[in-house]
């Protein structure tokens, strides 16, 4: 695995492979890698000739009261995991390499509509930061495909829309959520959880499963199902931000005629904010 920190070096290193018409894939990450990240790398390895991973804790997507300074960093372990998973190039830029010397004067990419609710409401500016760094990485790497986890489903749809709206010739591939044995979606922020909180956190997925099963069995009072799930999570000691049954293509509130659905959930446990979702299709 070749490690590079400069955009110019990355472009030079990839040019030979691009001229040779090899298929290049990108897996963007913020490091502190777990099996969910490595699942993306393995999917990229299976479907492309050259795998590029990036590790960059993007300050543009963190709010003023979020955990940028304390975001967990495990670079040495991350490098070992990426080598084992089959990464060819690791891009490790500094903030100045990505944004220059002025964060305040950065050109921003905004993806309207799909980013307006849910995490876009509770984390203003977050998706502008995500869209901007992803667009920059796409321009730097010029991949044929890019792999993203489906745990942050709103982010996944945002990147799909960005790619489509800007006419980027990149295939956006979603990879299923990796969970622990209790059903908790793997996240770099899970390391913030205490033992007691780790025991509570799987209730999010349990409720997602319960509500999706009830919808599949014919229940259609979506708003009542959402309200009931929120009350159950609150009673267990969690602090849900939202629990919403949506159209899986546009994240609008699910209607009776919708067949492709997603249930989105965000919950706080002390300092840790957990997101999860479940997607399913109703029989026609």
Image (tube, helix red, strand yellow):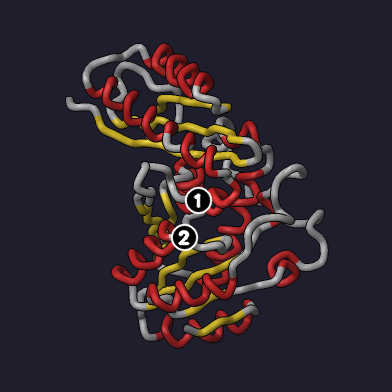
**Image point 63% across, 81% down: which residue?**
8
**Image point 32% across, 25% down: which residue?**
210
**Figure check: 103 above or below 15:** above
- Residue at mark 1: 187
Relative to 33, 63 lies left or right: right
**Image point 57% across, 50% down: which residue?**
189
**Figure check: 21 above or below 275:** below
Relative to 30, 152 lies left or right: left
Visible in this render: residue 190? Answer: yes
**Secondary structure type for disc 2:** loop
Find residue 87 and report its image quarter. Answer: bottom left
Relative to 281, 99 lies left or right: right
Residue 195 drawn at (x, y percent): 53, 43
Residue 152 drawn at (x, y percent): 48, 44
Tell me the quarter of the image containing the C terminus: top left
- Residue at mark 2: 34
Crowd tier of the residue under label 1, counting other residues whose Cα lies within 10 Å: few below 14, some 14–19, many 20 or above = some
Q: Total number of numbered labels?
A: 2
Crowd tier of the residue under label 2, counting other residues whose Cα lies within 10 Å: few below 14, some 14–19, many 20 or above = some
Compare residues 16 and 49 and report the one nearer the observer: 49
**Secondary structure type for disc 1:** loop
| Marks 2 and 1 in Cβ contact (< 8 Å) | yes
> Distance of mark 2 from mark 1, alpha carbons?
7 Å
**Figure check: 122 above or below 272:** above
């Amino acid at each position: 695995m070749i490690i590079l920190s400069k955009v110019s070096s990355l472009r030079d290193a990839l040019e030979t492979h691009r001229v040779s018409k090899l298929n290049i894939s990108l897996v963007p990450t913020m490091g502190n890698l777990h099996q969910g990240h490595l699942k993306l790398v393995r999917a990229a390895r299976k479907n492309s000739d050259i795998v590029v991973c990036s590790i960059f804790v993007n300050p543009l997507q963190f709010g003023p009261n979020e955990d940028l300074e304390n975001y967990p960093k495990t670079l040495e372990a991350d490098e070992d995991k990426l080598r084992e998973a089959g990464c060819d190039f690791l891009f490790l830029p500094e903030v100045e390499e990505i944004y220059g010397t002025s964060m305040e004067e950065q050109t921003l990419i905004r993806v309207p509509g799909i980013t307006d609710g849910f995490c876009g409401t509770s984390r203003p500016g977050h998706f502008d930061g995500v869209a901007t760094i992803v667009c920059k990485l796409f321009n730097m790497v010029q991949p044929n495909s890019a792999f993203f986890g489906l745990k942050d489903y709103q982010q996944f749809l945002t990147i799909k829309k960005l790619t489509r709206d800007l006419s980027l010739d990149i295939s956006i591939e979603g990879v299923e959520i990796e969970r622990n044995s209790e059903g908790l979606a793997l996240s770099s922020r899970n390391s913030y959880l205490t033992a007691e909180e780790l025991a509570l956190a799987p209730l999010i997925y349990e409720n997602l499963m319960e509500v999706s099963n009830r919808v599949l069995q014919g229940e259609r009072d979506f708003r009542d199902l959402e309200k009931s799930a929120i009350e159950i999570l609150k009673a267990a000691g969690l602090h849900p931000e939202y629990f919403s049954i949506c159209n899986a293509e546009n994240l609008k509130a699910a209607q009776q005629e919708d067949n492709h659905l997603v249930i989105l959930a965000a919950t706080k446990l002390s300092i840790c904010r957990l997101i999860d979702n479940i997607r399913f299709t109703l029989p026609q």
